[in-house]
Amino acid sequence: MIIQRSDEVPDITLLKRFPVPRNFGVSAGSRIGKGRTWPAPGGAARIRRFDVYRYDPDSDGNPRIDTFHVDLDDCGPMVLDALIWIKNRIDPSLTFRRSCREGVCGSCAMNIDGTNWLACTRFISDLATPATIYPLANMSIIKDLVADLTHLFAQHRLVEPWLRSRTSAPERERLQSPDERHRLDGLYECIMCFCCTSGCPSHWWNGDRFLGPAVLLQANRWLTDSRDEATGERLDDLEDPFRLYRCHTILNCTRTCPKGLNPGKAIADIKKMLIERRG
Amino acid sequence: MTRTQMRSALGKAVGLGSARDGVENWLLERVSAVALIPLTLWFTVSTVMHAGDDYATVMAWLRRPVTTTLMALLLMALFHHTALGLQVIIEDYVHSRMKVLLLVGMRLGCLAMAVTGLVATLKIAFGA
């Protein structure tokens, strides 16, 4: 079965984690050690354990895993609520990005129980015990759960994600038929949280040149837009053994997208466009 | 500071630019894969069916024009597909200077094996 959306992913997976030793192939400075275990809050009836990745750039120490105990009766239902609860009640130095708390800003993307997802749209009740919270994989970590996204946004900038038109600007809006507008469905909803790119093995090995699923989905969004007139130039810039063709349809992107989009199909559509252009 | 460290994020992402190439390899890998489905099936079934036969019968089978044609097609599709697949694997995982050496060696190796197979097929077909 080819997975089309992240909500179609089966609950039971063959391997929760690929069986290699922990810290295998990890450079000395990135090896994760055991951190502090913070005491459970007194008098709490329902307690959930969270193992959270910590990294402090101001110390010379390696990353570590801190253990927190969250009082579920005092805390909202989402993973982000638990992180905010920890920051307010236990350790104010816990650092993470968050803004909208409703899955439209893409700030709180992180690795929750081994899957990249938005902390604000993941229920605590769906987590394993203990719940594990890591930052997005394959990124330089700035602090704790904050990953450095500079390169990914530079790659996004590279595909020129804005309308390029040679027709002189019209008096009013550039018109689009309802049908043409519907072709953008499944593309425009992307919030650039980079859950997909962080989970893509091709981007792990060749992230310097491969654009990754999030950026390629955005590229397809502008290739598909009926108002855009730079389709040819856009395809020229994408047709590259590394930028586009490093995608081997692994489909981790589609499995992990917290917005239920299908970056794998978007990339396949770009490949189809290139075949069509070739004739 | 070296130049790489001073370079902007966009400059690093752009790198050497787009190769404007790749669609040909992608298409040929798929076309050869489709061609290999009937060819491999034919080869497997035929080999199994000739398993108990003696040397003369197998040679007579190999000399038939249909067999020679299919064998030549199989060898070309197989080694072309192998070369394209191995190229992707090497490009994925090798990031040192070995990459160019491995790519050239792999290409020449696949070509040598295809030619060897073709020579053998033709020698059986037209030879004594």
Image (cartoon, rainbow, N blue to C red):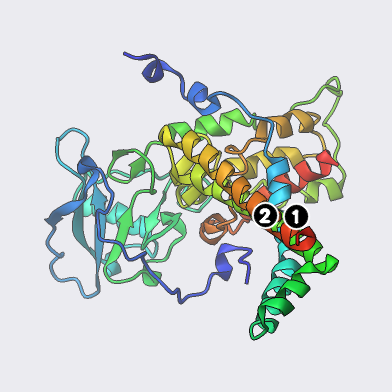
Quadrant showing the N terminus of chain A: bottom right
Residue A238, x across and y down, in percent:
66, 35
Q: Which residue sits at x=33%, y=71%?
A: A128
User: Is residue B95 shown above or below A115?
Assistant: above
Task: For mark 2, give the secondary structure.
Answer: helix
Residue denoted by label 1: B31
| Outermost residue to the bottom | B52
Q: Amino acid at mark 1?
A: Val
Q: Which residue sits at x=68%, y=52%?
A: B29
Q: Is residue B95 left or right of residue A66?
A: right
Residue denoted by label 2: A265
User: Is residue A14 shown above or below B25?
Assistant: below
Q: Is residue A27 left or right of residue A251?
A: left
Q: CA distance from mark 1 to mark 2?
A: 20 Å
Quadrant showing the C terminus of chain A: top right
Q: Is residue A115 left or right of residue A24?
A: right
Residue A154 visible, this angle: yes
User: Residue A120 versus residue B39: which sits nearer the camera?
Assistant: B39
Residue B65 quadrant: bottom right
**Closer to the observer: label 1 or label 2?**
1
